[in-house]
Amino acid sequence: MDSVLLIMRLLHIVSGVFWAGTLMFMALFLFPSIRDAGPEGGKVVAELTRRRFTEIVPVIALVAILSGLWLYWYASSGFQPEYMGSGVGMTYGLGGTAAVISLLVGLTVVRPSMKRAAAIMAAAAGRPDEAGMAQVQVLRGRAGMGGQVVALLLLVAVAAMAVGRYVGT
């Protein structure tokens, strides 16, 4: 087997598992827990930000997407229309599209909301006034809703990748 193909598959699967698993955990468990913790939840968001979570996850997502795009190009012999129009090609294409959209939602909704909420909490030394806390709650709600959208899109991507090779065969 081609060593580049092996490396790309490994990169795609490992980064995709990490990305999808992390975002599903966040949408289902972490964001609701942060929301329910009230002001104390801000400490968790601040720690995630301090540990560069909002920078690391998009890089991992990009690795998953770029390696997946390479695998799609490889499997389709250079994006041949016959392959791309087949059941396999369309299923992988749907999964890839869902992954790209989820990254865009994460970068434009989830990440900025988390960072802004963390900044408000940090500026108020973890104890914002009532107006600041209201703004943090709105931002957390936005991040949580965006996280749910991302998790759903990643579920579609994972499902498409899992069954893609068997569709239309």
Image (spheres, rainbow, N blue to C red):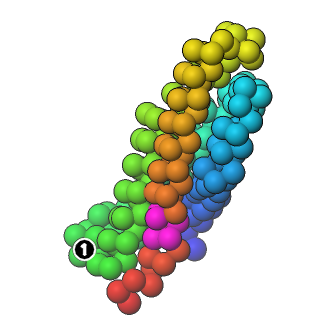
The residue at the point 71 percent across, 43 percent down is 33
Is residue 66 at all visible to an observer of this figure? Answer: no
Residue 126 x/y as whole percent: 74, 17
In magenta stretch: residue 161: no
Residue 145 x/y as whole percent: 50, 44
The residue at the point 53 percent across, 29 percent down is 138
- Outermost residue to the bottom: 169
The residue at the point 69 percent across, 51 percent down is 29
Q: Secondary structure at mark 1?
A: loop
Against 41, is 82 above or below? below
Against 7, is 77 above or below? below
Q: Is residue 150 left or right of residue 45?
A: left
Residue 137 x/y as whole percent: 59, 29
Crowding at mark 1 (Cα within 10 Å: few <14, some 14-19, many 20+): few
Against 163, is 128 above or below? above
Amino acid type at image mark 1: Gly
Tell me the quadrant of the picture where the N terminus can be found: bottom right
- Outermost residue to the front: 130
Indicate the quadrant where residue 78 lies: bottom left
Q: Is residue 48 left or right of residue 105?
A: right
Indicate the quadrant where residue 21 lies: bottom right
Q: Nearer the viewer, residue 115 or 134?
A: 134
The residue at the point 41 percent across, 57 percent down is 98
| Residue corresponding to mark 1 | 85
Q: Nearer the viewer, residue 69 or 102?
A: 102
Against 133, is 68 above or below? below
Range of residues picked out in magenta = 156-160
